[in-house]
Amino acid sequence: MYKMILIDLDGTLLNDYKEIPEENIEAINRLYDRFGIIPVIATARPLEVARYISRQGGRAFQKYILATNGAMLYDVENDEYLVNKSIGEGQLIQLIEICEKYDIEYEIMTSECEVADVIYSYRRVVDPMYDNMGVKFNYQENLREYILGSQQPIPLFAISGTEEELGQYVDEFRRIAEIQMSAQCLRTTPEADSESMLKPLVYYDIMRKGVTKASAIEVLAEHLGIAREEVIAIRRQRERYGDVATSRT
């Protein structure tokens, strides 16, 4: 018998409007009420976005949340972090310097939101999640200054561009000590309206070394005394772009 169920957000728990369908809420709460199976949101999105979704799901979801690819594992009932691993200031400076050196688009996630450079806003689609929450995507005119002056932890740094723009520089990012990069992923983009937008955009998530969803799940399972075989994960079957997995969820 399973005791914990990990659930991805986009394309899994949520519909295209970034809402939880009523049948999903009923099914998951039924598993919790009848069998005590604890549902845990596991996402790359910021913690506050995941908390917003969890409140829509009812009491079953008010237990634990795994956010920003496992950099944050939050105990909702006790208002405390079981995992909270942010990128160090030294690593952030190195990441920014490489991006500035090669004119690479980058963004960050805090516990509250995604933050990007306003000059790249044309590369982005409207995200219904932020509209649903009643907040705007956080664009900054001086992203470097914002990052280095931020009082919030920064668990995730991401670089974006075409394969050609990023491919030749990826190894330079990987040489930074105490960080790790995700596999290359395909980013949802607006309709191409110029030659510069004809090629798909890809991105890499960059986290502190050792941060993964799997490692955070292990921490939670141990915290709850749940064996590995008593944990199940549900996520969409992602489309592929060559050897590239699609979009952050």
Image (spheres, helix red, strand yellow):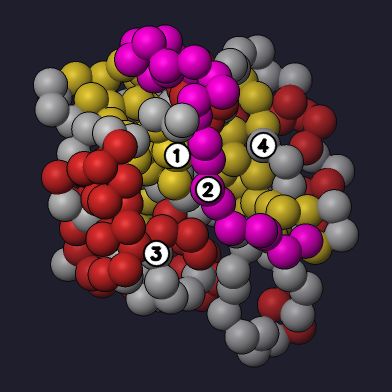
Q: Residue at x 65, y 13 (%)?
A: 177
Q: Nearer the viewer, mark 2 or mark 3?
A: 2
The CA span between labels 2 and 1 is 6 Å
Q: Which circle, 4 or 2, is nearer the viewer?
A: 2
Q: Nearer the viewer, residue 144 or 166?
A: 166
Q: Which amino acid type is marked by label 2?
A: Ile
Question: What x and y, as percent, mark residue 84?
Answer: 35, 19
- Lateral position of residue 64 relative to residue 100, left or right: left
Left or right, 55 with respect to 180, comes to left
Cα–Cα span, label 1 and label 3: 14 Å
**Height in image: 198 above or below 54?**
below
Q: Nearer the viewer, residue 154 or 1?
A: 1
Distance from disc 2 to disc 3, alpha carbons, whole Å, reads: 12 Å
Whether tag 2 and tag 1 are in contact, CB under 8 A, the answer is: yes
Mark 4 touches mark 3? (CB < 8 Å): no
> What residue is disc 4 on?
182
Magenta residues, as a range? 218-240
Circle number at residue 234: 2
Q: Nearer the viewer, residue 163 or 65?
A: 65
What residue did someone put label 3 on? Answer: 14
Between disc 2 and disc 1, whose residue precedes? 1
Q: Which of the marked residues, 4 or 3, is nearer the chain's N terminus?
A: 3
User: At label 4, which amino acid type do we have?
Assistant: Ser
What percent of the width, then of the height, locates residue 10? 47, 60
- Kind of element beneath mark 2: strand
Comparing marks 1 and 4, which lies closer to the viewer? 1
Check the image and report above or below for 66 versus 193. Answer: above
Q: Residue at x 31, y 46 (%)?
A: 31
- 1 vs 3, front mark: 1
Residue 6 numbered tag: 1
